[in-house]
Image (spheres, rainbow, N blue to C red):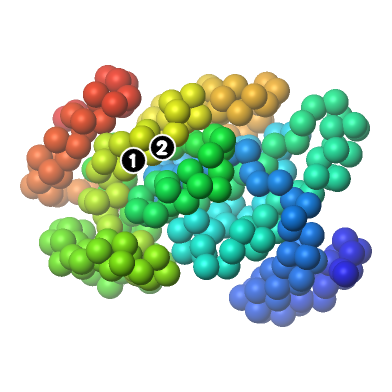
Amino acid sequence: MMTDKDMAVTAATVRSESPTTWKYRLKQAARAYTVPTSRLRPLPEFLIIGAQRTGTTSLYKYLSEHPQFRSATLKTKGVHFFDTRYDKGMSWYRAHFPTSAYRAMFRARHGVDLVTGEASPYYLFHPHVPFRLAQHLPDVKLIAMLRDPIERTYSQWQHELSRGFEHLDRFEDALDAEPGRLAGEVEKMNADPDYSSFAHQHHSYMARSRYAEQIDVYRSLFPAAQMHFVRAEDFFADPGVEYAKVLDFLALSPHSLGDYKKHNGYKRTPMAAETRARLVEHFADSNGRLEKLLGPHFTWTE
């Protein structure tokens, strides 16, 4: 069985290769070490489930600075097990997290419990994830970050365009194409749990921003005490305050950072007034439902 020292040697060797190659090989080496001990590795205490383009990377980076927190293997932010890698099995998922022995050692040394988690923003939107979480992690704490749906929709399109997952370079064209791209995809996913929909994951701009229907499902499966909602605008405006609220929710000791750097941001170009008006109308019903679910703080009005 590979030791921690062996892993360090492997990492030093493969870093000299191309980034894509050495990262893949390093992950493979890590799996060879961690999967055989997966039964000794407890599941995570919390998940950041989304939404995409709401600050989840920044929040996870902040949590990674907390002395009680340990990230998934190789400092992985999103394991994406419950959405796109569920076929790999629970042993593969457990392999990403610290062992019980390490947790006990941490507790003995520091007098507090270690906490671990991951952030996979597709979890909130994927139709199978809430039911899989209820089955495998019924006591997990869930953090959902929500942003003005118009801004989130626009930001996702920019994100997918920059990554090469979108070829429509006019936002309006992508909005027009969305219904056709998504037609029948959820039905295919429901018929075949192993079916992976590229369009559902990468081209669901408006659909992902209709938060109410997604939160309805989670609320039906998890008690309110296990869910914490962050308004992205508050998080961006005063990250220290929102970070402290998350720490309280996770029962972690108070902690502050010297620099609350914003991660994965994009330079914005103006949105056409007609397009914004179209999206205001589109999201009006969903926003109204969300306000009833979470209260008046979670509303976005023009």
Give, as a three-letter code, the residue at label 2: Leu
Percent coordinates x, y for residue 198 in the rendering: 34, 69
| 244 left or right, relative to 229 | right
Percent coordinates x, y for residue 250 in the rendering: 61, 28
Res. 179 in view: yes
Residues at marks 1 and 2, CA–CA distance in whole angstroms:
7 Å
| 230 left or right, relative to 58 | left
Q: Are marks 1 and 2 in contact (CB under 8 Å)?
A: yes
Q: Residue at x 25, y 64 (%)?
A: 187
Give the position of the N terminus as an image quadrant: bottom right
Give, as a three-letter code, the residue at label 1: Val
Q: Residue at x 65, y 63 (%)?
A: 92
Res. 267 in view: no
Q: On screen, 206 above or below 62? A: below
Q: Based on the displayed image, in which of its 4 quarters is residue 200 positioned?
A: bottom left
Percent coordinates x, y for residue 294 in the rendering: 32, 25
Q: Based on the displayed image, in which of its 4 quarters is residue 45 positioned?
A: top right
- Crowding at label 1, few (<14), some or many (≥20) Cα neighbours within 10 Å? some
Q: Element at badge 2?
A: helix
In front here: 136 or 79? 136
**Residue bearing mark 1:** 217
Percent coordinates x, y for residue 40 in the rendering: 78, 52
In the picture, the disc for residue 221 is: 2
